[in-house]
Image: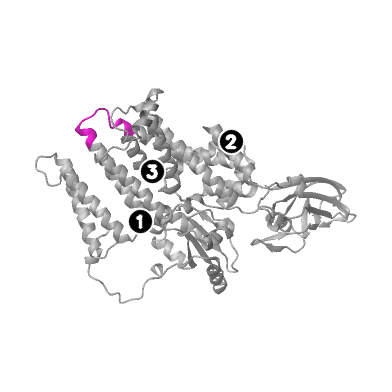
């Protein structure tokens, strides 16, 4: 399976990408020393190639007595939203020496640079190293050690978490990259994007019916996770190469309604209304080959593939880092391997869940009927959860209340001869679901406080506190953002990329942005929310402008309206950590 995936990804790159120049053809660096002991450096760039000005770095190595005092550089121009050199730039680097240095000194001069092709390919960071013999008598003495180190400081650029991960992929050992992303995937399995898949894989395994062994449950769980990993990998490679977020594109209402209907159909089959299976002709044909249950694997694989694209489309920093690496280098093979390892790590707990679900059905009987019905309820819950993205909150709350009431009655909330524990659970569920139903009629949309509308309204005699006086300005296009940036020049700005279909975004709103300390600190910023729910042309342009592959993403701008790229946050962050982060901006 892995070889097939790697082959498909390699073929995708070869077919989709135009012919690009090799790095040594696109960039030809040269450096020399003049009579004044100044280094003259130049990068000859080919046609339709440009260099990022911020990626041009110069460094003196292996000699602490010689430092860079000054760099004379040509003026960069704006190109695709970044400052760049569109023609071959030349630089004059002035050196300085420590006061106690005399005679000839050998130095190693390192020039780092990175650029892109106008055809859409970005090359990986490059370096050229030169060795020069410096006559220190022609150099001026550094004013202070502090001034010398100040020239070195710009050489170490503070990287965001996403860029740091992307750099790790490019510079690390392949085996280390794969193992690292496998471990990161295990950690990401604890995030809200993966939780909805737990009842899905459980329900799919249980729906296989009688005679399901632990071995087959393991086999089907592995099939589900591999299909999920393939979907993540393909979607990630496409997003990295072309900037098209396939997962976001599948969050349209008709897709959500269709997938919710699938879960409803699965649930009804678990309740015994009908049996979902392949046509008898296909089953008989498969049976003659000795693979009587191969058809089930196909359905599980399809469910795993679709679940990855539709159920859990949120972006975390490691995923974004892999996408940035693919986008910058075009290396879909290594980037795809990292994504595949990440997906497998996320899926390992799901395999354990699937195997456990299989063990719930050791033999037919009343116990198996009850377990199957419970998973049917979970399937209906997933269907309603998906509808939250495209329908009014009142409708989903009403559906949840109806599901809870029906489940409570099925469990025997009003039966006399029933185990006390089962009846207690059923009654609690009935009371809560009834509260949801009443809350819906009263106009409430809170699942945690459905009856809050019954509380008397207290009129505040004093002004609201600063901590509560925060609100986001919603935008959906680049022009709206540019207008707000210009209007609020001189103020710090926080830009939150969010979408209705992103579960992690909702967790950020509920846990992090609602925290009192976070609110107080955020009141120092102009708060803007980029709503990319529709994922239309304007939303895509906005995301592409700032290299956002999907929500959630939090970006920051300084008082001059410049993006603080190293301060960007991808994925969920706890309230206390977020406050610490805001204090550093």
Mark 1 and mark 2 lie on one chain; the one further toward the N terminus is 2
The magenta segment is 356-369
Q: Residue at x 31, y 35 (%)?
A: 206
* Front one among 516 and 325: 325
Pointer 2 residue: 7
Q: Residue at x 77, y 61 (%)?
A: 73
**In this picture, residue 86 sits left or right of residue 348:** right
**In this picture, residue 191 sits left or right of residue 32:** left
Q: Which mark is residue 197?
A: 3
Mark 3 and mark 2 lie on one chain; the one further toward the N terminus is 2
Label 3 Cα crowd, 10 Å radius (few <14 / some 14-19 / many 20+): many
Q: Secondary structure at mark 2?
A: helix
Q: Looking at the image, do the residues carrying marks 1 and 2 touch, with CB atoms under 8 Å apart?
A: no
262 in relation to 175, above or below: below
The nearer-to-camera label among 3 and 2 is 2
Disc 3/disc 2 C-alpha distance (Å): 28 Å
Instruction: Confirm whether the magenta stretch covers residue 470.
Output: no
Pointer 1 residue: 388
Q: Which mark is residue 146?
A: none
Disc 1/disc 2 C-alpha distance (Å): 38 Å
């Amino acid at each position: 399976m892995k070889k097939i995936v790697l082959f498909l990804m390699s073929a995708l790159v070869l077919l989709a990408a135009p012919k690009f120049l090799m790095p040594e053809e696109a960039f030809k660096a040269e450096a020399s020393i003049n009579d004044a002991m100044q280094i003259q450096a130049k990068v000859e760039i080919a046609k339709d190639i440009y260099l990022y000005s911020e990626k041009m770095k110069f460094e003196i190595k292996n000699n602490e007595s010689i430092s860079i005092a000054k760099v004379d550089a040509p003026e960069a121009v704006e190109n695709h939203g970044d400052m760049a050199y569109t023609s071959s730039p030349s630089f004059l680097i002035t050196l300085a020496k420590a006061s106690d240095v005399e005679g000839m000194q050998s130095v190693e001069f390192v020039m780092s640079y990175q650029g892109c092709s106008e055809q859409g390919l970005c090359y990986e960071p490059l370096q050229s190293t030169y060795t020069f013999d410096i006559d220190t008598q022609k150099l001026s003495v550094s004013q202070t050690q502090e001034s010398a180190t100040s020239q070195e400081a710009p050489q170490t650029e503070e990287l965001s978490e996403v860029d740091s991960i992307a750099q790790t992929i490019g510079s690390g050992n392949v085996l280390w990259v794969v193992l690292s992303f496998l471990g990161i995937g295990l950690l990401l399995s604890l995030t809200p994007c993966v939780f909805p898949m737990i009842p899905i894989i459980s329900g799919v395994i249980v729906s296989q019916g009688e005679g399901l062994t632990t071995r087959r449950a393991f086999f089907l769980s592995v099939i589900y996770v591999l299909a999920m990993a393939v979907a993540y990998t393909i979607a990630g490679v496409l997003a990295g190469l072309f900037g098209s977020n396939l997962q976001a594109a599948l969050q349209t209402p008709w897709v959500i309604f269709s997938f919710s209907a699938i879960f409803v159909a699965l649930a009804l089959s678990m309740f015994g209304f009908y049996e979902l299976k392949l046509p008898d002709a296909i089953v008989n044909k498969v049976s003659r080959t000795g693979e009587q249950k191969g058809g089930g694997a196909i359905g599980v694989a399809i469910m795993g593939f679709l679940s990855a694209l539709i159920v859990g489309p949120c972006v975390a920093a490691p995923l974004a880092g892999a996408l940035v690496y693919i986008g910058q280098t075009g290396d879909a093979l290594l980037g795809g391997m990292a994504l595949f390892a990440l997906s497998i790590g996320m899926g390992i707990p799901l395999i354990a869940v699937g195997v456990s679900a299989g063990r719930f059905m050791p033999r037919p009987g009343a116990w198996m009927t009850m377990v199957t019905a419970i998973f049917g309820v979970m399937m209906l819950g997933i269907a309603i959860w998906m509808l939250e993205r495209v329908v009014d909150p009142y409708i989903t709350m009403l559906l949840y209340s109806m599901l809870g009431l029906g489940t409570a009655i099925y469990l025997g909330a009003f039966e006399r001869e029933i185990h006390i524990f089962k009846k207690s659970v059923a009654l609690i569920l009935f009371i809560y679901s009834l509260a949801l139903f009443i809350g819906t009629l009263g106009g409430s949309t809170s699942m945690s406080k459905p009856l809050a509308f019954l509380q008397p309204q207290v009129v505040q005699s004093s002004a609201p506190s600063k901590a509560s006086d925060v609100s986001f300005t919603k935008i959906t296009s680049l022009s709206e953002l540019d207008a707000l940036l210009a209007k609020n020049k001189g103020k710090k700005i926080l830009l939150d990329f969010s979408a209705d279909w992103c579960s992690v975004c909702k967790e950020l709103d509920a846990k992090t942005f609602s925290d009192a300390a976070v609110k107080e600190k955020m009141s120092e910023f102009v708060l803007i929310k980029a709503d990319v729910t529709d994922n239309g042309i304007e939303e895509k342009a906005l995301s592409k402008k700032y290299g956002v592959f999907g929500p959630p993403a939090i970006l920051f701008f300084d008082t001059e309206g410049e993006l603080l790229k190293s301060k960007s946050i991808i994925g969920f962050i706890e309230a206390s950590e977020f406050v610490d982060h805001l204090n550093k901006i």
